[in-house]
Each structure stands twice: as structure tokens, then as C-alpha cells.
Amino acid sequence: MLDKLGLTSQRAAMTGAGLLLLTGSLHSIAFLIHEWNADTIPLIPVGILYLALGALIRSGHQGARTWAMIAVSLGLCAAFLTFGGDVPTWLYVIYILIDIGILTMLGWARIHAH
């Protein structure tokens, strides 16, 4: 279905990278959005990892796509496991939705790579 919309492998990868940069930024500043606490502090290194992976994908690093899918899959599991902690529910929902978008785009790019 996405191919009927003109989504190429490269565009899907760049969209996934853009979403990684977005969620990386949100993870990195969660303590500013909510407060500095035991649940927001661990989000900082996750955000930095996502930012790095997004930047690597944008620069054409093919291996970063696979590592990003692994990291985001683990992050998605962590979001579900820690849901209800001292991070606002709406922020968790945003993280989860963006993670699903990243996995969709990078998965699409992987399946349709030439």
C-alpha cells in the first residue's frame, strides 16, 4: 500500500531517521518537559542514542538502520514495561506512536531495498 503512495526505500529510511531525530530530542529533554526524576534521567542516554542513529541513517550509514530497529524495538518494550511511572502518560503515548512509525518506515525500507 505504501508503495502506491510513492514511498521508496530511501524515502522510508529518511522518514524513519527523521522520526528517530524527533523522538531522540523528546527523550533527551523529557526532564525539562516533566521534571528531573528517577524515570526521566534514564531517557537522556536513550535520546542521545536515537539522535546518533538518526544522524547516521541520514548520512547514509546502512548498518545504522538495523541497529536503529533493534534499539527502537527494545525502547518500545521498555516504554510498555515502565508505562505508568513518573513520566506523563501522554509523553509515553507519543514515544510509543513514534517508535511504531520508526519501525514501520525502517522495516519498509529494509523489505523494499534494492
Image: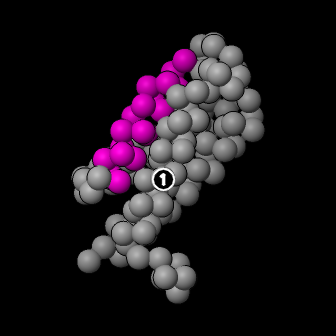
Instruction: Tell me where residue 93 appears, x and y as whole percent.
Output: 69, 43
Q: Is residue 55 magenta?
A: yes
Identify which residue, 2 or 61, lies in the foreground: 61
Q: Residue at x 48, y 60 (%)?
A: 15
Instruction: Farthest residue to the bottom: give it.
Output: 4
Q: Quadrant of residue 71?
A: top left
Q: Against 44, is 100 above or below?
A: below
Instruction: Farthest residue to the front: give it.
Output: 59
Q: Please, which colouring scheme is shown?
A: one colour
Q: Residue at x 42, y 39 (%)?
A: 51
Instruction: Farthest residue to the top: give it.
Output: 37
- Could you classify mark 1 by the number of other residues whose Cα lies within 10 Å: few (under 14), some (14-19), or many (20 or more)? some
Q: Is residue 19 visible?
A: yes
Q: Is residue 7 magenta?
A: no
Q: Residue at x 36, y 69 (%)?
A: 10
- The C terminus lies in quadrant: bottom left
Q: Give the amino acid at mark 1.
A: Gly
Q: Is residue 76 visible?
A: no
Is residue 40 found left or right of 93 in the rendered image? Answer: left
Residue at numbered disc 1: 18
Instruction: Tell me where residue 112 appears, x and y as whole percent.
Output: 35, 76
Is residue 51 found left or right of 89 in the rendered image? Answer: left
Q: Against 55, is 85 above or below?
A: above
The prevailing secondary structure element of the residues shown in magenta is: helix
Q: Against 3, is 23 above or below?
A: above
Instruction: Tell me where residue 23 appears, x and y as whole percent.
Output: 54, 42
Q: Residue at x 43, y 53 (%)?
A: 17
Give the secondary structure at mark 1.
helix
**Which stretch appears magenta?**
41-58
